[in-house]
Image (cartoon, rainbow, N blue to C red):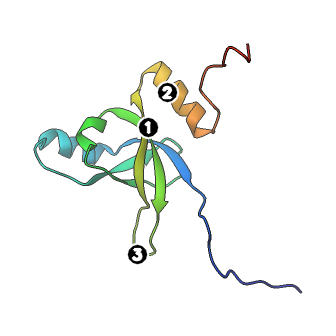
Amino acid sequence: RRTGEVVAIIQRKTTDVVVCMDAVDEEELVRNPHVKRNGALCVPMDGKLVKVKLLTRRAQELIGQRFIVRIDRWQTNQRYPDGHLVRVLGPVGDVDVEMLALLARFNIPSEPFGAATL
């Protein structure tokens, strides 16, 4: 029987997750708009994934928005992984935004075809 040992992790796989802000954090930001926060809890579009702790000072701008978060790390003593904002897609519920979110969720390119391709 062959065995092996992990000696080092050279590069971690980056994971992008389509999310919107958690309702509790959203309500707190609306009630206290002047409170400075360094992040917010976000709910993934994919219900099988855990919530992501978004590290940003722009949480106020993300209320009611759907956006993409890249997971940076998940330490053993943390309940949720940490991530940073990659891209804002637009308002939750907008048909075009939800289409972009589905494409991003399944890693399907959403850029239009170039002139050379057509």
Say which amino acid is labelled 1: Arg
- Whether residue 118 is situated above or below residue 104 in the rendered picture: above
User: Sequence-wise, which precedes: disc 1 or disc 2?
Assistant: 1
For the point 57% across and 32% down, which residue is it? 102
Q: Nearer the viewer, residue 9 or 78?
A: 9
User: Which residue does the numbered mark 1 point to in the structure image?
Assistant: 87
Mark 1 near mark 3, Cβ–Cβ under 8 Å? no
Mark 1 near mark 2, Cβ–Cβ under 8 Å? no
Q: Is residue 40 visible?
A: yes
Separation of residues labelled 1 and 2 (CA atoms): 14 Å
User: Which residue does the numbered mark 3 point to in the structure image?
Assistant: 77
Say which amino acid is labelled 2: Glu
Mark 2 near mark 3, Cβ–Cβ under 8 Å? no
Q: In the picture, residue 59 is in which quadrant? A: top left
Image location (x, y in percent) of residue 72: 47, 59
Separation of residues labelled 2 and 3 (CA atoms): 34 Å
Question: Would residue 50 be found to the left or right of residue 33 on screen?
Answer: right
Q: Nearer the viewer, mark 1 or mark 3?
A: 1
User: Sequence-wise, which precedes: disc 2 or disc 3?
Assistant: 3
- Whether residue 81 is situated above or below residue 7 in the rendered picture: above
Q: How many C-alpha atoms fall within 10 Å of the one at disc 1: few (<14), some, or many (≥20)? A: few
Give the structural element (helix, strand or loop) at label 1: strand
Q: Nearer the viewer, mark 1 or mark 2?
A: 1
User: Sequence-wise, which precedes: disc 1 or disc 3?
Assistant: 3
Image location (x, y in percent) of residue 14: 56, 55
User: Which residue does the numbered mark 2 point to in the structure image?
Assistant: 98
Separation of residues labelled 1 and 3 (CA atoms): 28 Å
